[in-house]
Amino acid sequence: MFNPAQIGSLKIPNRFIRSATAEFAANPDGTVIDEYYKLYTDLALGEVGLIIQGHLYIMDEGKAHDKMAGIAHDYHLDGLKRIVQSIHNTSTGSKVAAQLNHGGFHSVSKKAPSKRDEKNDRVMTEDDIENIILNFGNAALKAKQAGYDAVQIHAAHGYLVSQFLSSKLNQRTDSWGGSLENKAQILLSIYQRIRSQVGSNFPVLVKMNNSDEPHEGFPVEEAAKVAKWLAEEGLDAIEVSGLRSTRTKFEDEAYFSKNARIIKKNIGDMPLSVVGGFRSLKVIQQLHQEFADFVSICRPFIREPDLVKKFREGKEISDCISCNKCFKPPLIITCLDKEN
């Protein structure tokens, strides 16, 4: 886990990935606040191999919540450049990717693949879909211009792209719904548009659900097929994540590993990272030895941004207790249990 690795053309100092999360650290116009810089500098100083910053809205109508940072306008770039520089200026060699997102029915526009019962969703037109694809490409180009080492398409966690992938949330009868090929068309089109904008040597990743529990509209067999198609298109890496219908304070580790193994068997040599409640170095190393090229961690890095360094120096288990208080911060995402 501590040896250098590679995603596409990008050399990464180790196999630990900071999985993106909503930091709640932006002004109303989507520009980042000053607290952002320390958050990311600390992760880099803590020796995280690849830091995925998330999630950035690619157009104003796709903004999913207050305090969400954007990459939709040129005026967003000065602050984002400072984040990239704060990471690259450390001596650890940490890399940083920008996660690109549209909230779909979670966004201010309430636009969705199809209307849900008793919801105020606005069904997307084909022009809406094409415009979103274009804006993903534009945002990726902005990320490259800002100095990011890679971009990641957010296709998980109930946001726009994962809404299209789910047959429970996507009940369209046109070319963007119905068959799995149609449901996945928006993701593949976004990838192709981004690739045309950033070139062949700039790494592009996807974060995708291993299934869409609890909706049951995107089983792991379909996730594996979509991952295979992405690999055939030339995607540089996939991060396997998901949602859980039940969550307790103290969770078992590696809860997405079973489905991640299935997906890994379908993608050839394309690198795979798996998310899923990792707390102990022993479990992380075991999964790496068995199938995972990288391991993605989020909440433990909120409590201990230097966890990779601590693991390297002999620590065995993170202090994170999975209380999830970190996702309701007063200002910026932080470990409230540690603060108290």
Image (spheres, grey):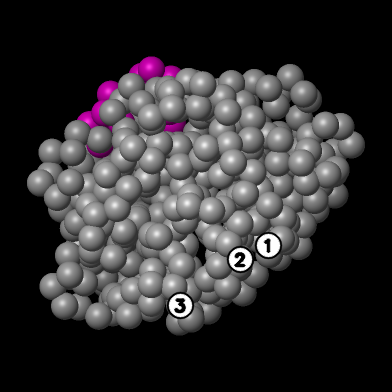
User: Magenta stretch containing residue 178, yes or no?
Assistant: no
Q: Amino acid at mark 2?
A: Ile
Q: Nearer the viewer, residue 48 or 67?
A: 48
Q: Nearer the viewer, residue 182 or 81?
A: 182
Q: Is residue 132 above or below residue 153?
A: above
Report the Cα–Cα distance between label 1 and label 2: 8 Å
**Is tag 1's residue or tag 2's residue first in the polypeptide sequence?**
1
Q: Is residue 259 above or below residue 194?
A: below
Q: Is residue 69 left or right of residue 234?
A: left
Residue 177: percent from left, percent from top = 82, 39
Q: Secondary structure at mark 2?
A: helix
Q: Is residue 12 left or right of residue 202?
A: left
Q: Amino acid at mark 3?
A: Glu
Quarter holding residue 125: top right
Q: Secondary structure at mark 1?
A: helix
Magenta residues (range): 68-83
**Is tag 2's residue or tag 3's residue first in the polypeptide sequence?**
3
View extreme (right): residue:
173
Q: Which residue position is annotated with label 3? A: 253
Residue 145: percent from left, percent from top = 33, 22
**Is tag 3's residue or tag 1's residue first in the polypeptide sequence?**
1
Would you call the spot at circle 2 few (<14 residues within 10 Å), some (14-19), or many (20 or more)?
Answer: some
Q: Which residue position is annotated with label 2? A: 262
Q: Which residue position is annotated with label 1? A: 220
View extreme (left): residue:
91
